[in-house]
Image (spheres, rainbow, N blue to C red):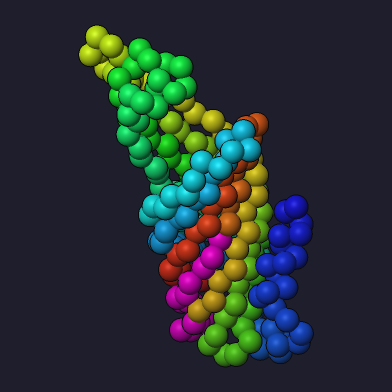
């Protein structure tokens, strides 16, 4: 699946001979940072549990040989918070609780390959794909029948994949500004979360 995602991303980023004809030599190290929004769609035990969105941020470091390179970095997918009414506890068989509040946050580390192609002198198209080492953190606060507040937390982590494409402007040999669309997959056992992330990105090349 990761191989297919990479092929699709590179195909969108560079078609025909346009890229090779206009490619700059971007050999060297780079740092890329982005801020935007993450849009989630989650399923639990194959049941659709809805969609949500929050602020997202990412930072990557890497090295390119001409226009193809490797990258590693960190992505914060934001969080989702919900209040739980007493009717929900009765429905799932826990009538001893009267209300509650849960917060689910996600982040992770990435390592993969990327491309930066120039159909024209200033316009670039980018592509990236690789391994996503993610972690979900759940915080819960529940009130029982005596009015006592109980707190708990739980983590779940695993590895899936990510892929993305972007476009923007190369101001010069060192600086770029553009927009990215990235997809981060989270799936383990009975939980599956698709994360579509839209960011504005700035890159500096050394």
**Taking 13 as reference, is 157 above or below it?**
above
Can residue 181 be spotted in the picture?
yes
Report x, y in % for residue 188.
Answer: 63, 35
**Residue in view at x 56 percent, y 42 percent:** 48
Of the pair 10 and 186, the residue shown nearer to us = 186
Residue at 43% across / 50% down in the picture?
52
Q: Which quadrant of the figure has residue 89?
A: top left
**Magenta segment boundaries in residue numbering:** 169-182
Q: Position of residue 83 (x, y in %)?
A: 32, 34
Residue lying farthest top?
146
Q: Position of residue 9 (x, y in %)?
A: 68, 67
Task: Please report the residue visible at 76 percent of the width from the left and 57 percent of the height from the top.
Answer: 3
- State the residue at coordinates (56%, 61%): 182
Residue 75 visible from this viewpoint: no
Q: In the rendered view, would you say 20 is above or below 141? A: below
User: Would you say 13 lies left or right of 96 here?
Assistant: right
């Amino acid at each position: 699946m990761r191989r297919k995602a990479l092929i699709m991303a590179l195909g969108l980023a560079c078609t025909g001979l346009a890229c090779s004809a206009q490619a700059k030599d971007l050999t060297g190290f780079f740092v890329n940072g982005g801020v935007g929004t993450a849009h989630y769609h989650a399923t639990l035990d194959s049941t659709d549990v809805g969609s949500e969105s929050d602020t997202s941020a990412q930072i990557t470091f890497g090295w390119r040989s001409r226009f193809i390179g490797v990258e590693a970095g960190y992505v914060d997918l934001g969080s989702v918070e919900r209040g739980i009414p007493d009717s929900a506890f009765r429905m799932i068989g826990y009538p001893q609780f009267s209300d509650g509040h849960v917060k689910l946050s996600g982040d992770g580390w990435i390592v993969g390959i990327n491309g930066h192609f120039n159909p024209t002198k200033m316009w670039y198209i980018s592509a990236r794909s690789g391994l996503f080492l993610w972690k979900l953190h759940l915080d819960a606060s529940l009130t029982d029948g005596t009015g006592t507040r109980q707190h708990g937390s739980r983590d779940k982590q695993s590895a899936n994949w990510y892929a993305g494409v972007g476009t923007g402007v190369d101001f010069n040999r060192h600086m770029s500004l553009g927009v990215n669309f990235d997809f981060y997959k989270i799936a383990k056992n009975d939980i599956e979360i698709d994360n579509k992330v839209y960011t504005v990105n700035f890159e500096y090349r050394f």
